[in-house]
Amino acid sequence: MRRPEYAMDMELIFEIRDADEGGFYARALGHSIFTQGETWDELRANVLEATSLHFEDEAVQPRLVQLHYVKDELIPVEAA
């Protein structure tokens, strides 16, 4: 079975959020890849390792990994 041409330029997007216990956690959109890291540098290394392991038996590998950092902030609004 021939894969679509765009697959050769596959971009893998990870959603990054702050972990409750400190550090960060990452989740790949559209793939079952999850990892975490105490620092941003550790997280980046873990994302690359997890990606490599996830796609190690695949003919098509992602050519680009995007880390999308999401920060939730709740701001209380006082009643006037």
Image (cartoon, grey):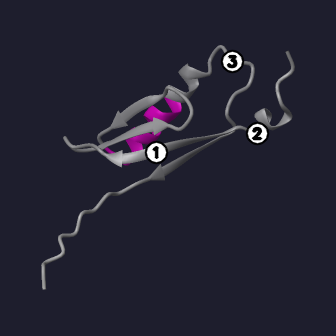
Q: Nearer the viewer, mark 1 or mark 3?
A: 1
To which residue does mark 2 refer? 9
Contact, mark 1 vs mark 2 (Cβ under 8 Å): no
Q: Amino acid at mark 2?
A: Asp
Query: What span is in magenta?
Result: 39-49
Where, by quadrant of the figure, is residue 58 drawn? Answer: top right
User: Which residue carries the number 1 mark?
Assistant: 15
Whether the residues at callouts 1 and 3 have beta carbons within 8 Å, the answer is no
Of the 4 image quadrants, the one containing the C terminus is bottom left
Q: Nearer the viewer, residue 12 or 23?
A: 12
The span from disc 1 to disc 2 (Cα, nearest Å) is 19 Å
Residue pointed to by mark 3 = 58
> x and y percent of residue 15 in the render?
46, 45
Residue 24 lies in the magenta-colored region: no
Query: How would you classify the magenta stretch by its main secondary structure?
Result: helix
Instruction: Find the distance from the CA under tag 3 to the CA under tag 2.
Output: 14 Å
> Which quadrant holds the N terminus?
top right
* Label 1: which secondary element: strand
Q: Can you say whether 59 is above or below 72 in the image?
A: above
Within-10-Å neighbours for mark 1: few <14, some 14–19, many 20+ = some
Total labels: the figure holds 3
Which amino acid type is shown beneath numbered disc 3? Glu
What element does badge 2 sit on?
helix
